[in-house]
Structure formats: structure tokens, C-alpha cells
Image (spheres, grey):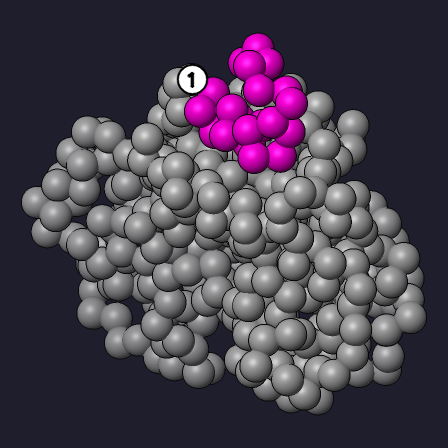
């Protein structure tokens, strides 16, 4: 076997769409980006969607346009990809790290009140691995203190919180289209919001602060001289990427259901193996399973790193759990402890999960897990 952790779900439809975009002669941000944005907004239930080059640039744009700047503080979980904190730093602000809930591995709302200061301007929960954070509890705190709620929804397209898809809660949410995410455009990001003024400013911000878009100038029947009322960035998505994204959106529900089916199989097969703990998904959450992770307990006969090495010997790729940002060298000034975050990042690992993962491969992964952790169960029914 040779089983990777992730494979994008791309086919001939995406290939042909990209070719059509190239042949159209309009390959930068144009009509296909607009179509992709409209489809995305409709899917999540938001009024507006603004495409960017990545989720990192989406987060930076959402923070900057919302007024986050030098001297401000933004509360974030440390258990996340480093881009979560970096986007705050790129604005000149300071990330303030909080610990996570051990059961869901998301930001623990109970930790928030204790770190809010006069400098706090926003809370940025991460829907880690696609599992939505406890938005009601977090929103109650942002409302109480007059703070912004900016969601890092990099992994969360297709997930829902209390029946409402992530991105459609009326807050600002930022998504990723990296190849390891649910849908991909190679690289790319999206911001959703119900705020018309914010959406308009985000569109200018991603286009150097230009007062009109290239498409608006192209469609005009008179000469338009653009202006630059504010400084922006080049965060534009291309129509080639958007063409792929449109086709991916058509497959999104199928992709999510296949991932949920694979996760259900893992749940059934792994729940009886001692030495590991599975992630808890609350009843009010619809999880897209962007990744499937397990915690390797202290009682396990092998450590997390040993298990990953043994898997590799058997042709199965795995990845460590999410990093603890405050323990990375570039954040070495943050000399404090977040015990749950540090335990989870040390002991969790991600298993292979992608729509084309076959039943034979699934059975092989779970059989190897059983052989390594519970050899007395060898031969158990798959």
C-alpha cells in the first residue's frame, strides 16, 4: 500500500474549466471570480463573498479592513496553523493565545473573559479541522464587550453550527482552498460577510485600494480613470482558479458526504482500540471532516511519533496534530503554558482521509492500527 494523508478531488471537469478560462483571454480576476463568489455566498447563506489569494490573505484583509492595527490585541487559539497568529501580526497587532477544550480541540470560551483587556479588539476562533467552534458562547462574549468576531474557517466549508452553515452566521468568516482542504483552487481564499460596506472595502483592499475593478473598467462605455483612496494589497484570485472553484462547488456536497462516511468507518473501527481517544463531535455540529485525528494516550504501547513511524513503514502516511503556535521559535516571546494545547499537539495525529480513499485502503489503515496498538484484537472484523 501507498496511502497519502490527502488527495484533492479533481477531475476532467476542473481541467476543462481551466482550459476554457485560459482560452477566454481573461485570466486574471474577472467574471468567473464573481460567479465563484456568488455561488459560495449562496451556499453558506451569506450576503457577500470576496475571493482572495489564500486564507492567510483573507484573514489579514478581514482584520485590517475591520480596523485592527498597531496596539490592538486579538484573541486566538494557539492550537492552529501558524497563519492564524501571523495574520494578526501582519496588521501590527498582538495575538493573545488561549487554551482549547480538550474534547473538541477548539477555543475554550471559558478562557476568554480572563484575557480580555482594554486593547482587545477582536476574538478569532478557529473551526479546527472543520469542526465548528462554540459560536453562541463566543458571540455572547464579543457582544458583551463590543468586540469583533472574525472566524478562521479555513477548514470549515460544508460544516454547520446548529443547522446554519459556517460562513452564514452574519459574522466575517475566512476560508481556504489549499489542496488539503475540502475543495481546492490550488491556492485561494474567501471572505464571507453580511456587511455591504465591509464587502465593498474588502474588494478594494484586495486590488491595491483601487476605486474600480478591471472588469468595471472593461464594461464601461466611457474612459474611467481609477483612483486609490486607500492603500491596499494585491490579493486577487485569478479566473483560472475561480473556474476550478466553480466546478469544485458543484461537487461539494458529495465530497462532504464521502468524507463523513469514511469518518464514520474510522469511528466504528477505532473506538474499540485501547490507547487512543477519538475527537468528540457535539450533537449540534455537522462536521465536514476536513481531517480525522486521534489522540495517542499515555497508556498506548507506542508513542504518537513511534506510531507514525510504524505507519510509514507500512506505506501509510500520517501527520502530527496541529501545532501549538506559542511554542514555535518565532513566537518565543510568549513564555507561558497552555497545558491542553501542549498535550494535544504532542499526542495527536491525522489519518488519511479523502474521497477517493478505497474500502480496501480503509481496512488496511484500521487493521494496521489494531496490529500496532491491540495485537490481541488481530483478526477483528473490518
Across and down, in percent, residue 77 comes to: 71, 63
Foreground residue among 6 and 367: 367
Residue 373, magenta (yes or no):
yes
Seen at 64% across and 74% down, the residue is: 327
Quadrant housing residue 287: top right
Residue 220, magenta (yes or no):
no
Seen at 26% across and 76% down, the residue is: 225
Foreground residue among 64 and 78: 78
Across and down, in percent, residue 5 comes to: 42, 42
Magenta-highlighted stretch: main secondary structure?
helix
Is there any visible trace of residue 202 in the rendered image?
no
Q: Quadrant of the C terminus?
A: top right
Across and down, in percent, residue 118 comes to: 86, 82
Q: Is residue 220 above or below residue 74?
A: above
Seen at 78% across and 79% down, the residue is: 336
Q: Is residue 44 above or below residue 34?
A: above
Q: Is residue 281 above or below residue 74?
A: above
Is there any visible trace of residue 377 in the rendered image?
yes
Quadrant housing residue 328: bottom right
Could you tell whether 27 is left or right of 287 in the image?
left
Q: Quadrant of the N terminus?
A: top left
Count of marks placed on residues: 1
Secondary structure beneath label 1: helix
Q: Which residues are magenta?
A: 363-382
Foreground residue among 51 and 53: 53
Mark 1 surroundings: few (<14), some (14-19) or many (≥20) residues within 10 A: few
Foreground residue among 173 and 283: 283
Quadrant housing residue 164: top right
Q: Which residue is mark 1?
A: 359
Could you tell whether 19 is left or right of 163 in the image?
left
Seen at 63% across and 20% down, the residue is: 377
Amino acid at each position: 500500500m501507498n496511502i497519502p494523508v490527502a488527495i484533492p478531488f479533481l477531475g476532467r471537469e476542473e481541467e476543462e474549466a481551466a482550459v476554457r478560462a485560459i482560452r477566454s483571454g481573461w485570466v486574471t480576476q474577472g467574471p468567473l471570480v464573481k460567479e465563484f463568489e456568488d455561488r459560495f455566498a449562496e451556499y453558506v447563506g451569506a450576503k457577500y463573498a470576496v475571493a482572495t489569494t489564500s486564507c492567510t490573505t483573507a484573514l489579514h484583509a478581514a482584520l485590517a479592513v475591520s480596523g485592527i492595527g498597531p496596539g490592538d490585541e486579538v484573541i486566538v487559539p494557539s492550537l492552529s496553523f501558524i497563519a492564524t497568529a501571523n495574520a494578526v501580526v501582519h496588521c501590527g497587532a498582538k495575538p493573545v493565545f488561549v487554551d482549547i477544550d480538550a474534547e473538541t480541540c477548539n477555543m475554550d470560551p471559558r478562557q476568554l473573559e480572563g484575557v480580555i483587556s482594554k486593547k482587545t479588539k477582536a476574538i478569532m476562533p478557529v473551526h479546527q479541522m472543520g469542526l465548528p467552534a462554540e459560536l453562541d458562547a463566543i458571540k455572547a462574549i464579543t457582544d458583551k464587550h463590543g468586540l469583533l468576531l472574525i472566524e478562521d474557517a479555513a477548514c470549515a466549508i460544508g460544516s454547520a453550527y446548529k443547522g446554519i452553515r459556517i460562513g452564514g452566521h452574519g459574522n466575517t468568516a475566512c476560508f481556504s482552498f489549499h489542496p488539503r482542504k475540502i475543495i481546492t483552487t490550488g491556492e485561494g481564499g474567501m471572505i464571507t460577510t453580511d456587511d455591504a460596506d465591509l464587502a465593498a472595502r474588502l474588494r478594494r483592499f484586495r486590488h491595491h485600494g483601487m476605486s474600480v475593478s478591471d472588469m468595471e473598467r472593461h464594461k464601461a462605455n466611457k474612459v474611467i480613470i481609477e483612483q486609490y483612496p486607500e492603500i491596499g494589497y494585491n490579493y486577487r484570485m485569478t479566473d483560472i482558479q475561480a473556474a476550478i472553484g466553480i466546478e469544485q462547488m458543484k461537487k461539494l456536497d458529495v465530497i462532504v458526504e464521502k468524507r463523513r462516511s469514511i469518518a464514520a468507518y474510522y469511528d466504528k473501527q477505532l473506538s474499540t482500540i485501547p490507547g487512543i481517544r477519538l475527537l468528540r463531535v457535539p450533537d449540534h455540529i455537522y462536521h465536514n471532516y476536513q481531517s480525522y485525528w486521534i489522540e495517542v494516550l499515555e497508556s498506548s504501547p507506542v508513542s504518537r511519533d513511534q506510531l507514525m513511524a510504524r505507519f510509514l513503514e507500512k506505506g501509510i502516511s500520517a501527520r502530527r496534530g496541529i501545532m501549538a503556535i506559542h511554542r514555535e521559535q518565532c513566537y518565543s516571546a510568549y513564555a507561558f503554558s497552555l497545558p491542553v494545547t501542549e498535550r494535544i499537539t504532542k499526542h495527536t495525529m491525522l489519518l488519511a482521509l479523502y474521497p477517493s480513499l478505497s474500502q480496501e485502503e480503509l481496512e488496511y489503515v484500521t487493521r494496521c492500527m489494531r496490529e500496532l496498538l491491540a495485537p490481541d484484537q488481530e483478526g477483528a472484523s473490518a
